[in-house]
Amino acid sequence: MSFIWAIITGFVLSIVLKTGWGFILGLFIGPMLYQAFCNKLTEQKTKANPELYLTVVFEVLGHLSKAKGVVTQDDINLASQFMDRLQLDRNSRKLAQDSFNRGKASDYPLRSRLAELYAQYRYRRNVLNIFCEQLIQAALVDGILDEKEQQILFIVAEEFNIPRQQMAIYVQMMMGSYHFRQNGYHNQQNQRGQYQHGNHYGGYQGRSTQTDLQNAYKILGIDSSAEISEIKRAYRKLMNEHHPDKLVSKGLPKEMLEAAKKRAQEIQAAYDLIKSARGFK
C-alpha cells in the first residue's frame, strides 16, 4: 500500500512542480504520508486510558523513591507535595497513594507496566513526552536526581522507544525548569498577573541574571548559541506539545492538566526572557 501512495504522491508532485524530480520526491514522501495516515487511524481506534496513566506515574514515582534504598518520610512528603501541586481530589489522591505504595515493592514489574502504558499511548507521543517530563519533575522535587533514579528514567525511555539522548535532554530541560521556579520567577509573574491572560500566556517582565538566562535555554532544550530561527522553532514545538486542549483529546488525565498548563507558562516565560536578552520579537 505504501508503494501505491509513493506512486500517487510522485504523480501529483510531478504535475504541481512541473518537473520529473517531483515524481522522485514523491517516492520518498509518499511512504511517510502513508505511515502518518496509518498512525492517525490507529490512534483513533486505540482508546486512551487516563486512569492507567495516572496509576503508572505514581507507581514509577514510588519505584524511584525505593531505588535510593529505604523510602524515608522525606520521600513520602515529597510525593505528597507533588500530589498537592496536581491538585488531586480525594479519590484521585487515594489512587495515587495506593499506586505509590505498589511501586515501592521490591518485585514491582517496572518494564511490564511501562509496556502496558506504551501500548495504550504509542501513537500519542505528546502524552508519553509529558509523562517523562512529569516523572522527572516529581523526582526533582528535592532538586536532586541521583544515578539510580537516572537509570530508571532510561528504562522508561527504552520502553517508550525514546532515544537515551532525548531522555537526557528532557532531564536538562526539567532541571532548568526546577531552577527557574526556585529563583521565584513563576511566583513573581503570578503575583503581577502577567503570566496568563484568558487563553494566552503573558510575557516575562521580571529582572534576570545570566543564570536565569541559561536556565531559560535549558527549558527550551536548546543551546545558548542557538540561532533565532532555532529558538522560535523549539518554542513553537513545545507550546504545541503542551497545548491543553490537544493533550486532553489525546488522553492526558484531567488531574495532570494543571501541571501541563504550568509547564506551558514556564516555556512562555523562558522564551520571553530569551527574546528580551537577544533583542528579537
Image: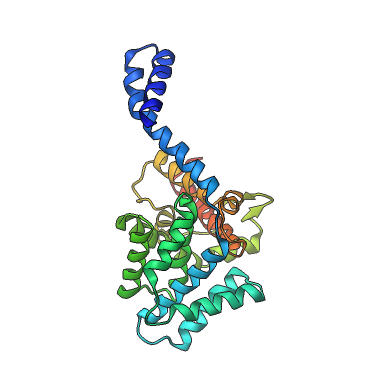
- Relative height, residue 240 to residue 163 (above, below): above
Looking at the image, which residue is at 37% across and 64% down?
A: 156
Can residue 177 be seen from the camera position used here? yes
Relative horizontal placement of residue 242, taking residue 3 as reference (left or right): right
Number of labels in the image equals 0
Q: Position of residue 231 (x, y in %)?
A: 42, 44
Q: Position of residue 22 (x, y in %)?
A: 36, 18
Q: Quadrant of the N terminus?
A: top left
Looking at the image, which residue is at 52% across and 64% down?
A: 53
Q: Nearer the viewer, residue 145 or 55?
A: 55
Relative horizontal placement of residue 117, taking residue 156 as reference (left or right): right
Q: Position of residue 195 (x, y in %)?
A: 61, 56
Q: How is the image coloured?
A: rainbow
| Residue furthest out toward the front | 1
| Residue furthest out toward the top | 18
Looking at the image, which residue is at 39% across and 71% down?
A: 110
Q: Nearer the viewer, residue 183 or 265?
A: 265
Can residue 240 be seen from the camera position used here? no
Q: Position of residue 239 (x, y in %)?
A: 52, 48
